Amino acid sequence: MILTPEGLEALRSQLIVSCQAYPGEPMRDPRTTGQVAASAVIGGAAAIRVQGLADVEFTRTAVEVPVIGLWKDGHDGVFITPTLRHALAVANAGAHVVAIDGTRRARPDGLSFAATVAGIHAESHALVMADCGSLDDALAAAEAGADLIGTTLSGYSGERPKTAGPDLELLAQIAAANLSAPLIAEGRIHTPEHARQALDAGAFAVVVGTAITHPASITGWFKGAMHA
C-alpha cells in the first residue's frame, strides 16, 4: 500500500496510536510493538506510529493501517529522524509516513528541512510528517512541503512552555493559519477528554501514545494519585 496525500483524508477525526517503549524496558522488542499495534487497531486506531527500523518492519506485517515511522538517534536537540539518511532508512523499512524533526533548528547533516523533505519525496514513496514545536515551525514546515504537521515537540524545543496536557493554544494557532497540510495533535494527550479537546481546537487527527501503550507510566499515574 502506498499512501498518497489524498489518501490522508481517511484519517480525518481519527485516532492514531503511538506504540513505543524506552530502551531497557521489558516491552522494548519489535515483536511486542507489532502486537501492541495490532491490539490498538482492534480498538479502532486508524494508523500507528512506531520508533525504530525493526519496529516499523514488524508493525507493517502486523497491521493493515498506515504506519508512521521514525528513528530516534540521541536525546537532545534534533534527534527525531535527524538526517535524510535516517529518514530514507525508515521509509525503506516500510513506513508509509516518515516523521522527522520539524523545527527550524540546524540538522546534524547540514541539510535544510526543505532539502530533507525533498529528498524523502524524491527517493521514496513515503509522505513526511513534521514534528513541530511552534507556530513558526508549522508555517515553515508546510512551506517546505511537509505532508502532515504535528505538534509533537511543543514544550520540548525551547519555544513554548510545556503544558500539563495538550497544547491547545498552539493547535488553535496552527488551525487558524489554514495550512494545506493536515494538522496532527500529539503530545501529552492523556485522557479521552484531551483527545476530544484537540479535535475541537482544530486538529485533523490525534496521536495518543503513553496513555494507551506505556504500562509503566499508566501504572505510575494510578499509584501517584492513590498516594498523593
Image (spheres, rainbow, N blue to C red):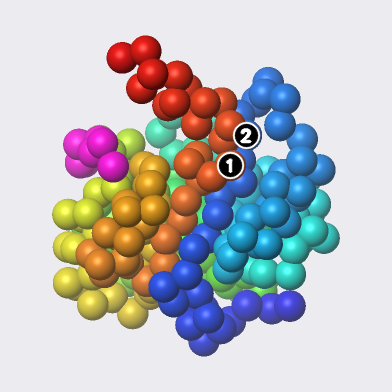
Sooner in the amino-acid sequence: mark 2 or mark 1: 2
Mark 2–mark 1 CB contact (< 8 Å): yes
Horizontal and vertical percent for residue 123? Answer: 66, 69
Identity, as a three-letter code, of the amino acid under mark 1: Thr
- Tell whether 127 sits left or right of 58: left
Identity, as a three-letter code, of the amino acid under mark 2: Ala
- Tell whether 140 sits left or right of 209: left
What's the magenta bit mostly, secondary-structure-wise? loop
- Tell whether 115 sits left or right of 182: right
Q: Residue at x 37, y 71 (%)?
A: 204
Quadrant housing residue 158: top left
The part of the chain drawn in magenta is: 159-165
For marks 2 and 1, give the one nearer the viewer. 1
Residue 213 tag number: 1
How crowded pointer 2 is (Cα within 10 Å; few <14, some 14-19, many 20+) is rated as: many
Tell me the quadrant of the picture where the N terminus can be found: bottom right
100 versus 3 height, above or below: above
27 versus 193 height, above or below: above
The extreme top residue here reads 227
Q: Residue at x 54, y 45 (%)?
A: 212
**Is residue 98 within the magenta segment?**
no
Q: List the residue tagged with mark 2.
A: 21
Horizontal and vertical percent for residue 184? Answer: 39, 63
Quadrant housing residue 142: bottom left
Q: Nearer the viewer, residue 192 or 49?
A: 192
Q: Secondary structure at mark 2?
A: loop
Res 120 visible: no
Q: Secondary structure at mark 1?
A: helix
